[in-house]
Image (cartoon, rainbow, N blue to C red):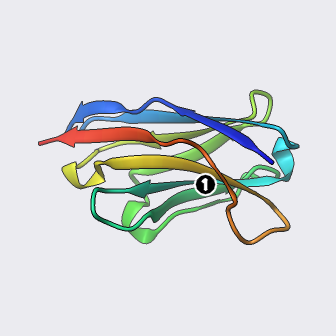
């Protein structure tokens, strides 16, 4: 099991930036793939970004490339999501997730952090 604690959400104006953090514990960090998902009111949870904590390789949906950046700190066992040029449609609850590199499903989830972008 991996315990995940998110922080850094809040209210920001359109065009602004926010930085979300996810602290992981309970399992060897470098053996994880960690990801961010988001869920807007009345909508399904969608993928935002992921990172292989061993190699640092990242993946993003095309719609978010260039605005969002995921990174990791293996010493602090923390994953960061840097969000720039935010838009009102980025408003959602953002969730951190983790899975062992050998698995395909994310079974470990954080509690979520609210991001609200005002126009």
- Measured along the vertical axis of the image, is residue 87 above or below residue 23? below
Is 69 on the left-hand or right-hand side of 9? right
Q: Secondary structure at mark 1?
A: strand
- Circle 1 packing at 10 Å, graded few (<14), some (14-19), many (20+), is many
Q: Quadrant of residue 115?
A: top left
Question: Where residue 43 sits in the image (x, y, percent)?
Answer: 32, 66
Placement of the C terminus among the 4 image quadrants: top left
Q: Quadrant of residue 5?
A: top right
Decide which of 93, 119 is in the foreground and name it.
Answer: 93
Question: Where residue 60 sits in the image (x, y, percent)?
Answer: 52, 63
The residue shown at (39%, 57%) is 39
Decide which of 86, 104 is in the foreground and name it.
Answer: 104
The residue shown at (80%, 29%) is 75
Is 14 on the left-hand or right-hand side of 113? left
The residue shown at (40%, 33%) is 9
Which residue is the site of mark 1? 35
Image mark count: 1
Q: Quadrant of residue 13?
A: top left
Question: Where residue 116 sits in the image (x, y, percent)?
Answer: 27, 40
Q: Residue furthest left?
A: 119
């Amino acid at each position: 099991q991996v315990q995940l604690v998110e922080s850094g959400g809040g209210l920001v104006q359109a065009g602004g930036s926010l930085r979300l953090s996810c602290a992981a514990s309970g399992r060897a960090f470098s053996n994880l793939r960690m990801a961010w998902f988001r869920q807007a009111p009345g909508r399904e949870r969608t993928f935002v970004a992921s990172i292989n904590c061993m190699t640092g390789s990242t993946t993003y949906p095309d719609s978010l490339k260039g605005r969002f950046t995921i990174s990791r700190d293996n010493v602090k066992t923390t994953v960061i999501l840097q969000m720039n040029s935010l838009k009102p449609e980025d408003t959602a609850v953002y969730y951190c997730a983790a899975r062992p590199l050998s698995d395909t499903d994310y079974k470990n989830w954080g509690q979520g952090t609210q991001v609200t972008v005002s126009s």
